[in-house]
Amino acid sequence: MLGATLPRPRSAGAAPRRTRCALWLGLAMILCASGCGGSEGGAGEGPGRRRQSLALTPQQELELGRVAFKEVLSKPDEYGPALPADDPRVKRVRGVAQRIIKASEIEPLQREINLRVRGYNFEWQVAVLKNKQVNAFCLPGGKMAVYTGILPVAENDDQLATVMAHEIAHALAHHSSERLAREQKYHRAIEVIGGAMPGMSRQGRRAFMGVLAAGAGVRSKAYDREQEAEADHIGLFLMTFAGYDPNEAVRFWERMAQEMAGRGRPPEFLSDHPSDEHRIQALKNWVPKVKAAKKAFDEGRIAPARSR
């Protein structure tokens, strides 16, 4: 992971402490109320302190991501060939991703979102695949694929950051491991880690990849709307703390809605996502709060947790 330097608070007095507590308590409440929370009342171990069961250990999650990413890159006829590293589109996508990854290491943000990052290693890697689909997807352990078809929809880097932060949020929230637990596919995951993927039927491979990543080739109910709203919300904070304009997230999804209307059907990227109207309104509601948190961070009014 890349490092991030946190500014210290300007004062150690009681008033700044109250400001910090109020700000981050407000952030936590926002997260819990808008897609990162569940019916458990914010007492769980997952993002926003919702309850979350995971199928995989940190090492298993990383290994599964490696195997699945290798599968994607080895099937250019199915997913599209990977563009070379010196392609301007690859440089653009990876540059945006790197900024968001750096922002994801800001400790107060991790703490208040309640991300499980201790003990996990993320091997952040992004492939840009030549494919006309308006699509991007995430695999366990930080492996991401972006189809060239989505790049014209993201008309600037702030809008591209919306896509990348959404995918990085899925990895940080361990959504693949959670879906495997929900669908009781732990044993199949262990078989895949052990080398079973080449022996699976094409249909079986696609079905399993559909559980791991939305848009990976088949429609999967595994990426439910709770996770999608969660990734939208976490992603909005990540892109803003990375220095991108959160207002552009709203504009990106408005452009996606236009793309959907023009095609007469949802792009793969929108499978099992919240409705455009609901998503756009939710983002509009979050933008002022995200900006306020970023302003407080930039002014040095947010401190990392004290080491014990």
Image (tube, grey):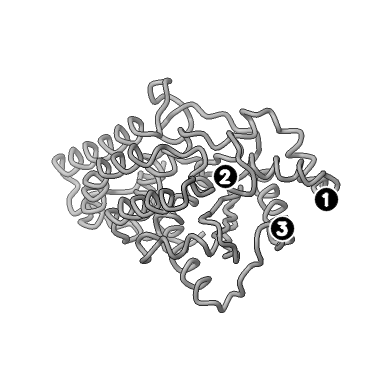
Q: Which of the two residues, 271 or 9, is positioned nearer the viewer here?
A: 271
- Locate residue 291, reporting x and y percent: 23, 50
The amino acid pointed to by label 3 is: Lys
Residue under label 1: 198
Most foreground residue, 261 or 204 = 261
Q: What residue sits right under mark 3 in the picture?
A: 70
Q: Residue at x 61, y 75 (%)?
A: 84
Q: Position of residue 74 (x, y in %)?
A: 74, 61
The foreground one among 141 and 163 is 163
Q: Is residue 202 above or below residue 28?
A: below
* Residue type for callout 1: Pro
Calculate the distance from the C-alpha at mark 2 to the C-alpha at mark 1: 21 Å
Task: Work out which quarter of the rendered image holds the C terminus and state it.
Answer: top left
**Gap between marks 1 and 3 measured at Cα:** 11 Å
Q: Which residue of the protein is positioned furthest toward the left in this rendering? A: 15
The answer to whether one can see residue 114 in this image is no
**Mark 2 sits on what residue?**
214
Amino acid type of the residue that numbered disc 2 sits on in the rendered structure: Ala
User: Is tag 2's residue or tag 3's residue first in the polypeptide sequence?
Assistant: 3
User: In the rendered structure, are the residues bearing label 2 and label 1 in contact, judged by CB atoms less than 8 Å apart?
Assistant: no
Whichever of callouts 1 and 3 sits on the residue coming sooner in the sequence is 3
Name the front one of labels 2 and 3.
Answer: 2
Residue found 49% across the figure and 45% down from its top: 265
Which secondary structure lies at badge 1? Answer: helix
Q: Residue at left 42%, top 20%?
A: 39
Please give the name of the residue rendered at 80% of the width and 40% of the height, measured from the top-left corner: 191
Q: Circle 2 sits in a helix, a strand or a loop, which is it?
A: loop
Task: Report helix, strand or loop for mark 3.
Answer: helix
- When asked about the image quadrant of residue 180, the answer is top right
